[in-house]
Image (cartoon, rainbow, N blue to C red):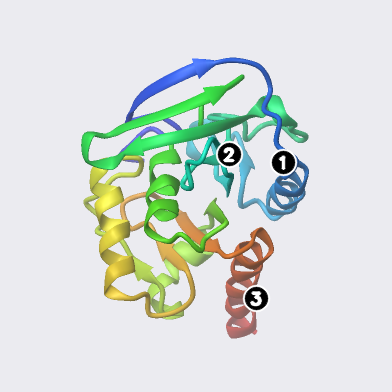
Amino acid sequence: MSETEGVIKFQLDFKRGGALDYAQIERIELWRQRLMRLGLIGQDDKRYEGLGFGNISHRVNYSGVSHAFVITGTQTGQLQQMDAEHYALVTDCDPQRNRLQAQGAVKPSSEAMTHAVIYRKLPQVEAVIHIHSPELWRHAQQLGLAVTNPAVEYGTPQMATEIERLIDAGLPRGHTISMGGHEDGVITWGESLHAAGNEILMLLGELQSRAQ
């Protein structure tokens, strides 16, 4: 790989505290475990230098901040079961200055900036999921998915700009983007956690049908 998986590239203003008090974490965790069973989120010694991959987030109304969200903590992919202490609360971000503000018992995922841009850009979105799927990534054009510039790395202001550009241009289908410069990286979102997760399952099912 040309980049190290899981490295936080933005400037993080992090306030360490206790476990989050957020009722939706149980629902998020159910989807995270489902995606783990499919190998789309997790940790594998044979992939990405053995580091964790993939993350999931959900919008939360925090002190009137409409774009705040909870997200899986950085490098938690090896955990089979997670609770509130393994999630971080992102309270603010400034993509142009590459800064993000968060709190919790663990730092947010290295992809938190990309999630933040989607929540800011699309107020109707309630959940964002970032997976690593070699199948979807390699067949992105075949599936008609939007693809970011391969020269742009994950977790950077440039990736935030790329995501905004593709959203403004109008995605050719669904709410899924393949990250051209991030090996196997695919990100999707929805107006509910269920909708976001099902879009991933639908795309995988379509690939399987084509292969038969």
Image quarter in which the C terminus is found: bottom right
Disc 1 + disc 2, Cβ < 8 Å: yes
Which is more foreground, mark 1 or mark 3? 1
- Residue type at the position of mark 1: Ile
Callout 1: helix, strand or loop? helix
Image quarter in which the N terminus is found: top left
Residue 131, image x, y percentages: 54, 52
User: Whole-Å distance between the Cαs marked 3 and 2?
Assistant: 28 Å
- Residue type at the position of mark 2: Val
Disc 1 + disc 3, Cβ < 8 Å: no
> Which of pointers 3 and 2 lies earlier in the amino acid sequence?
2
Residue 47, image x, y percentages: 53, 41
Horizontal relation, residue 181 to residue 192: left or right: left
Can you see residue 147?
yes
Q: Residue at x 41, y 35 (%)?
A: 92
Can you see residue 46?
no
- Residue type at the position of mark 3: Gly
Residue corresponding to mark 2: 70
Q: Residue at x 58, y 84 (%)?
A: 210
Residue corresponding to mark 3: 205
Q: Residues within 10 Å of mark 1 (few under 14, many from 20)?
A: many
Q: Name the residue at the front extreme.
A: 64
Callout 3: helix, strand or loop? helix
Residue corresponding to mark 1: 25
Q: Residue at x 36, y 70 (%)?
A: 146
